[in-house]
Image (cartoon, grey):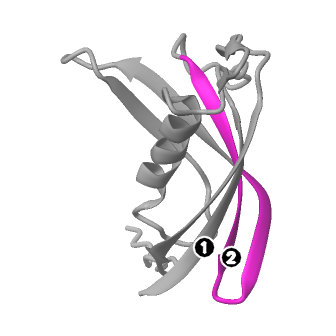
């Protein structure tokens, strides 16, 4: 498999949901990606969060990449956790700077390479 290099740039926590996917908090992740000599910029992924049965956060990642990359959802969640976690930039010498729902945006640069491949086209059977 080839490598795709993702350049994460920003996180918009609890972004307003234009699609109406329910009442679950949804964050937007802004990123660019380079794959097989092509550069795709200003892409977005939606991370919808819910509390699982064991009270841990569960993420649903919605995205549209021009190729297959099975590791992307885990990378997007890892980026979210780095930005929003206890070690994040929300803490400063003047005290905590917790996110304000719908009003915060975080510009945090992060790069990762993941295995990727071109999409396979399935022939459609009719009849």
Reading the image, the residue beneath label 2 is: 34
On the image, which quarter does residue 16 sit in?
A: top right
Q: Earlier in the sequence, mark 1 or mark 2?
A: 1
Write down the region rendered in magenta.
25-43
Q: Secondary structure at mark 2?
A: strand
What residue is shown at x 45% (from left), y 51% (from top)? 73
- Above-or-below relation of 49 to 120: above
| Residue 84 higher or lower than 10, as above or below | above
Q: Is 83 positioned to the left or the right of 72 in the image?
A: right
Query: Residue 95: x, y in percent?
Result: 67, 13
**Dot 1 crowding, Cα within 10 Å, few <14, some 14–19, many 20+:** some
Say which element carries label 1.
strand
Q: CA distance from mark 1 to mark 2?
A: 5 Å
Residue located at (79% from left, 16% from top): 103
Taking the magenta stretch, the answer to whether it contains residue 26 is yes
Quarter of the image containing the C terminus? bottom left
Q: Position of residue 42 (x, y in %)?
A: 80, 55
Asked if the residue at tag 2 contacts the one at tag 1, i.e. Cβ–Cβ closer than 8 Å, the answer is: yes
């Amino acid at each position: 498999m080839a490598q795709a290099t993702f350049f994460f740039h920003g996180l918009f926590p609890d972004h307003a949901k234009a699609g109406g996917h329910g009442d679950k908090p949804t964050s937007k992740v802004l990123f660019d990606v380079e794959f097989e000599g092509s550069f795709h910029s200003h892409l977005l992924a939606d991370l919808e969060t819910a509390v699982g049965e064991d009270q841990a956060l569960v993420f649903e990642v919605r995205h549209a990449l021009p190729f297959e990359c099975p590791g992307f959802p885990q990378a997007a969640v890892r980026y979210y956790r780095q930005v929003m976690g206890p070690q994040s930039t929300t803490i400063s010498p003047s005290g905590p700077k917790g996110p304000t729902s719908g009003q915060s945006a975080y510009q945090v640069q992060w790069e990762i390479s993941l295995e990727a491949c071109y999409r396979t086209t399935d022939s459609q059977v009719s009849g």
